[in-house]
Amino acid sequence: MYSIGIALYAFVARLIAPFHKKARLMTRGQKQTFDILRQKIEPGASYIWFHAASLGEFEQGRPLMERIRKEHPEYKILLTFFSPSGYEVRKNYEGADIICYLPFDFFRNATRFLELAKPSIAIFIKYEFWMNYLDGLKKREIPTYIISAIFRPNQIFFRWYGKNYRNVLRDFNWFFVQDRNSLEILKKYDIHNVTISGDTRFDRVNEIYLQRKALPLVEQFLQAGKENEKHALIAGSSWGKDEEMLIPYFNEHPEIKLIIAPHEIHESHISEIISRLKRPCVRYSQATEGEIARADCLIIDCFGLLSSIYRYGIIAYIGGGFGVGIHNTLEAAVYGIPVVFGPNYKRFKEARDLIQCGGAFSVQDEEAFNSRMNELLTYPEVLELSGKQAGNYVNQSIGATDIILTEIDPLLRTSLNT
């Protein structure tokens, strides 16, 4: 059944590739993988293979990758992605020696990949469970880990029909999981090689926080409203449904400024945002000193700035909660500001935790959003306490990378000699 599913997935990807950009990038990139490995793998070198499904998982694994590179320069790093949204953004990442796509999980692909790469250690990030690759690693006695993993009872491994697929979990030498619930689920199925390490994403957002950039244009934008005591709402990774709620509120509340970084920055979406605004706005890429001074809304129409922009807000709204799921809440929470998002957040442990500690709020509709915003803006003590709780939650959750590295460091020190 698993092999049939993979074959069907591959067939559909190839079928739609001429018409679908991501499918085209994936299928084209996978064809290049074996050539990349043949050309770039250095004979005799020891590689640690990191695999990330996409960009989010890459950021999750990045703190460990960079610590290993710093503390164990005797190893080289092989980094693979399954999704184009990860590979295309990070294909030039300088923290890895080789970066490529991971081909579809057919037995012949897994065998060929492992024979070419010959990894000394394999580290999968969060959710990746490719049966043929994992079976191949175990057969070759290559130590294999998964980090920042999280398990739920409704996953396929733990369903009545999931016994065969559950066996893939026994291919891992060790699990580093985010929470006790994951440990208890694995223990129920007699899997005991588990450590609760927490989530390495907290380490990553803390690194980003420490490396935050000053953005003079954003500072000029906010400075122009200081005489009227205007404060900034930061809307990060917003989608149309989010903007239908955010923008009317902003239009009716002159006491706030809005910095909006839409998830999609193509021209038609930016034009749609501008058409909804009833107050002066300016695009970041086109801003001049004069326009910045007159604007009440700053539209971020370029990538790479959002994680630094959150430092300038008093409230963050995180988009995606009216679609498949919210985007990164931790990048905002690390700055000690309240976080607001839509209703589709339950798959995200950090969002649930933030709500529980009072650092975040979920809104079901425009009326709930307006009510929550009014409360935060009317009562400074509520705003301050919520922000403090958000910041404390992130700060208290830092350290997963240290736990993982402490556990695997003995292996890293001995692996080259075995």
Image: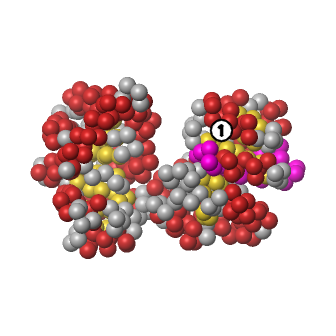
Residue at 36% x, 31% y is: 16
Instruction: Decide: is 247 above or below 275.
Output: below
Helix, strand or loop at disc 1? loop
User: Within the magenta stretch, is there residue 215?
Assistant: no
Q: Nearer the viewer, residue 173 or 187?
A: 187
Front-lying residue, 307 or 129: 129
Give the x, y percent position of residue 254.
84, 50
Residue visible at 40% across and 49% down? Answer: 57
Tell whether 375 sits left or right of 93: right
The residue to which callout 1 is attached is 300
**Closest to the observer: 388 or 81?**
81
Residue 317: % across, % down: 64, 54
Identify which amino acid the numbered label 1 is placed on.
Ile
Residue 45, horizontal then vertical, whole percent: 21, 38
Image position of 218 with respect to 249: above or below: above
The magenta span reads: 220-242
Q: Position of residue 31 (x, y in %)?
A: 27, 28
Q: Is residue 241 magenta?
A: yes
Examine the rendered structure and indicate whether residue 331 appears above or below residue 219.
below
